[in-house]
Image: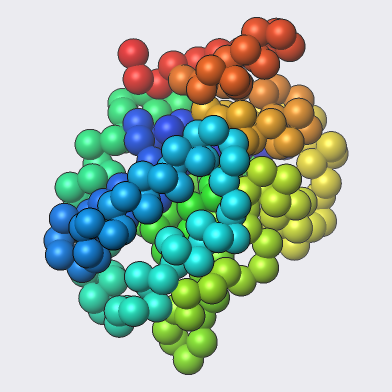
Amino acid sequence: MRLALFDLDNTLLAGDSDYEWGQFLVDHGVLERDVYEAQNRGYYEQYVAGTLDIHEYLGFALRPLAEHSGPELERWHAEFMRLRIAPMITPAARALVRGHLEARDLCVIVTATNSFVTAPIARAFGVRHLIATEPETRDGRFTGRVAGTPCFREGKLRCLDEWLATHGSRKLEEFEESVFYSDSHNDLPLLERVTRPVAVDPDPELAAEAGRRGWAVLSLRR
């Protein structure tokens, strides 16, 4: 069996769902623009630069989930999907995923963005399996804290290994072929572990690394 792993933000999506979710809440008056927008932009710039403190960021990003009820969040997310996410899904991204699904590969989206934001996006791509940062819940409500290991950088590899161990007890190295599509140098720990790393519309650092190592480079936007 072949394993096909997909990063989500700026890879399958022509944009960042985590950042856009925050901006969506700002635009709908749920969050205060002057305070939240500047912080959201600052954390995104840290992510791009590779300097993000993931625990600090998650304290910021998950707070809105804890401050509102499930029905409110679901209603907002449905509109978010229609207004922000649908325009970021390119035909090329759909075709890439569809090709792996039709080949009966084990397809998994592996993303640092929390599962509340990303689970409906994975379903929109027809991908059943999602490994994401998990928000903690208690008594049916989000607490604003993270549960377990954030699915980020080395944590993304750890989350994948744990997921594989509970879904068939197969290790990454035991797949006859494993491919990982990503745009970001933050994903180098996982890109280095698969048999076929693919840089998708890569950031400058990943583009340089892909060039040095002879990795494939793909665009889903042009």
Residue 205 found in image quarter:
top right
Q: Where residue 98 appears, x then y in whole percent?
A: 44, 32
Residue sitting farthest toward the left? 28
Q: Is residue 27 above or below residue 110?
A: below
Q: Nearer the viewer, residue 95 or 68?
A: 68
Q: Where residue 158 appears, x then y in whole percent?
A: 75, 52
Q: Is residue 58 above or below residue 91?
A: below
The answer to whether residue 12 of the structure is visible from this angle is no
| Number of residue marks | 0
- Which residue corresponds to the image point at 79% horizontal and 41% vertical from the top-left? 172
- Which residue corresponds to the image point at 51% horizontal and 61% vertical from the top-left? 58
The quadrant of the picture occupied by the N terminus is top right
Q: Where residue 90 appears, x then y in whole percent?
A: 31, 28
The answer to whether residue 58 of the structure is visible from this angle is yes
Q: Nearer the viewer, residue 156 or 121?
A: 156
Q: What kind of colouring is applied to the model shown?
A: rainbow
Q: Nearer the viewer, residue 67 or 111?
A: 67
Q: Is residue 126 above or below residue 117?
A: above
| Horizontal side, residue 4 vs residue 167: left or right | left
| Horizontal side, residue 5 vs residue 30: left or right | right
Q: Where residue 179 appears, x then y in whole percent?
A: 66, 29
- Which residue corresponds to the image point at 76% horizontal and 28% vertical from the top-left? 192
The quadrant of the picture occupied by the C terminus is top left
- Which residue corresponds to the image point at 34% horizontal and 79% vertical from the top-left? 67
